[in-house]
Amino acid sequence: MEILGKILGSPARVKIMRLFLLNKTKGFQGVDIAKRSRVTADAVRKEIKLLISSGFIKKHGQEYIFDSNFKYKIEFETLLLSSENLDKQVILDNFKKIGKIKLFLVSGIFIKNKSSRVDLLIVGDKLSKNKIEEGVKKLEAELGTEIIYAIFDTKDFVYRLNMYDKLIRDILDFPHEVVLQAKELSTHALKKS
């Protein structure tokens, strides 16, 4: 993200462009753009002017919408929506102070798998739902789209795993990447099917 912000001139621009690329048919008012991208209203006004003048977005009534005729749509999608732009450690860093994490895995949008049930799975003890929500909101602002996530305390997760819970099986049996895993939730225990 930092590199893209430098190349494109502004991290705010990257966030706003991702928001429109991931929501091509949806219109946003300036206030919505600021809230979803976590960018100041002044920065939104500045970036909107630039993005309109470049043909990236257009005004539609009271809202701004991605201009489907934008000449470099495919190139910007490739550049801005590539999962390689989000380092897994950077993702995990958003959740450093949420409690004792035992398992943290990414799927869905993070590995370009639209059929995943969740984008994030967090398992741990003494987890703060408020801090998790804050971390998710930060990631959503970076990515420009909503993140679907599941949270389990360790005991509940192990119980569900052993009971072949459908949600847990759907997450673990399909493509995902383990970012952090405690010894008690070793790969062997997770593949116990």
Image: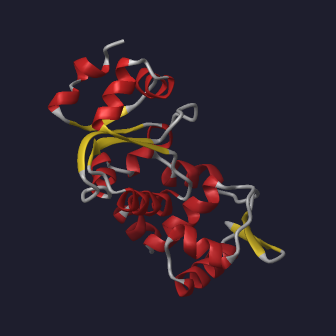
Scheme of colours in the image: secondary structure
User: What residue occupies the far left of the structure in this picture?
Assistant: 183
Residue drawn at 28 percent across, 43 percent down: 124
- Horizontal side, residue 97 vs residue 170: left or right: left
Q: Quadrant of residue 2?
A: bottom left
Q: Which image quadrant: the C terminus?
A: top left
Quarter of the image where the N terminus is located: bottom left
Quadrant in the picture for residue 32 = bottom right
Coordinates of residue 150 in the picture (x, y in percent):
45, 42
Compared with 61, 21 (above or below) is: above
> Horizontal and vertical percent for residue 49?
65, 81
Given residues 143 and 106, the one toward you in this image is 106
Q: In the figure, is residue 181 to the left or right of 138?
A: left
The number of numbered discs placed on residues in the rendered structure image is 0
169 w.r.t. 80: above or below: above
Residue 9 percent across, percent down from the top left: 45, 74
Residue 171 percent location from the top left of the image: 45, 28
Of the pair 190 and 69, the residue shown nearer to us: 190
The residue most toward the bottom is: 42
Residue with the most extreme top position: 193
Q: Residue at x 30, y 22 (%)?
A: 190
Please report the residue visible at 56 percent of the width from the left and 67 percent of the height from the top: 36
